[in-house]
Amino acid sequence: MRFAGKTVVVTGSGRHKGLGQGILQRFADEGANCVVSDVRIGDEAEEVAQELRGRGAQAIAIACDVSDPAQCDALVVAAAAEFGAVDVMVNNAGIGFMMKPFLDVDPADWAKVIAVNLSGAFYCTKAAAKDMVRRGEGGRIVNIASQAAKTGFPHLPAYVSSKHGMIGLTRASAVELGAHGITVNAVCPNHVTTALGAEQNEYFSKLLGFPTVEAYLANMAAKNPMGRPGLPSDTASAVAWLASDEAVYVTGEALNVSGGEEMH
Ligand SMILES: NC(=O)C1=CN([C@@H]2O[C@H](COP(=O)(O)OP(=O)(O)OC[C@H]3O[C@@H](n4cnc5c(N)ncnc54)[C@H](O)[C@@H]3O)[C@@H](O)[C@H]2O)C=CC1
Ligand SMILES: Cc1ncc2c(c1O)C(=O)OC2
């Protein structure tokens, strides 16, 4: 019960089987008050919150479009009003893919991906850290980057750039926030079969000439020493450790959770 009495906010966590839901399930199991947040709060987000309550946690759902700084400020205010403070902010909201060859990428699509994945993480980091600094009890920020933060992938230039940018954001914020007892780290998962992941599999299995999505997935699994795709629970384990008291001397890090597919 590492997070008894703590409050965690996870952006983009209102979808079934997403990394955000998996992360909140781990925090719920370890005693945290859980804030589900997503661009729209509908039945699915309410079900995610309900399932967390079923695990014995307190959980609420709050709408927040992370590409709007005012909504990120309001998210932190609303979470603190409900549970007293925000101890852990997980920047998980992300949009994929808009997959296109580099030379065909529309500037508006580029801007949208950067606005959600990178600027959104900045706005939420700033909002949460302001509250943490004011309270003076430290805090934890974890950014869900990607293997795409460490290497290039075809037909995903905005995504890859936004995720590399999240590592820069992690380091830039870590160097200033350490003085306040706040650590900031990134986690870099490889492929996880979520709703977002499934969309990408369709596209890449065709692009790379695999006869079926299954053949593409088997090939991808064979690329890492553990021989399987990642699970939301794999990422959740890393996030929970980084958010725990034990990780007090780890900050500005970008931790691969890729079964060894990515090694630096
Ligand atoms: N699935 C994978 O293989 C990998 C995913 N990731 C990252 O993990 C994070 C979670 O993705 P998944 O769980 O795979 O997909 P997902 O689609 O299940 O989760 C993303 C969530 O972000 C929400 N969202 C989209 N735009 C938003 C906005 N403007 N404001 C707030 N929320 C917004 C969506 O509604 C959705 O609930 C993303 O940042 C993604 O880039 C990283 C590495 C691998
Ligand atoms: C679906 C999917 N497959 C592979 C990867 C990602 C992804 O989202 C990613 O972000 O980095 C590698």
Image (spheres, grey):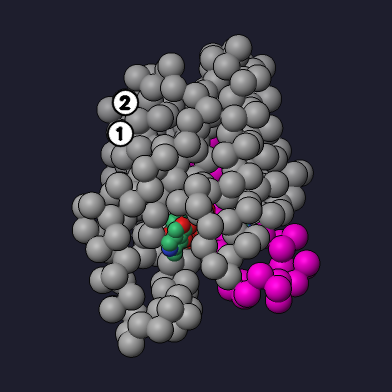
Cβ at disc 2 under 8 Å from ligand 1: no
Measure the C-alpha gap from mark 2 to mark 1: 6 Å
Residue 252 screen position, x and y as percent: 53, 28
Q: Tell me which corner region of the image, top left, top right, bottom left or bottom right, holds residue 168.
A: top right
What residue sits 62% from the left and 21% below the top? 175
Q: Tell me which corner region of the image, top left, top right, bottom left or bottom right, holds residue 201.
A: bottom left
Above or below 52: residue 167: above
Above or below 155: residue 146: above
**Total marks drawn?**
2
What residue sits 60% from the left and 43% below the top? 166
Residue 262 in sight in this render: yes
Residue underneath mark 1: 30
User: Magenta stretch: residue 107 in it?
Assistant: yes
Residue 242 screen position, x and y as percent: 40, 30
Of the numbered discs 2 and 1, the one sitting upstream in the chain is 2
The amino acid type, in three-letter code, at marker 2 is: Arg
Cβ at disc 1 under 8 Å from ligand 1: no
Query: Magenta region: which residues?
Result: 89-113
Q: Nearer the viewer, residue 185 or 123?
A: 185
Element type at mark 1: loop
Residue underneath mark 2: 2
Residue 144 screen position, x and y as percent: 49, 45
Residue extending furthest left? 226
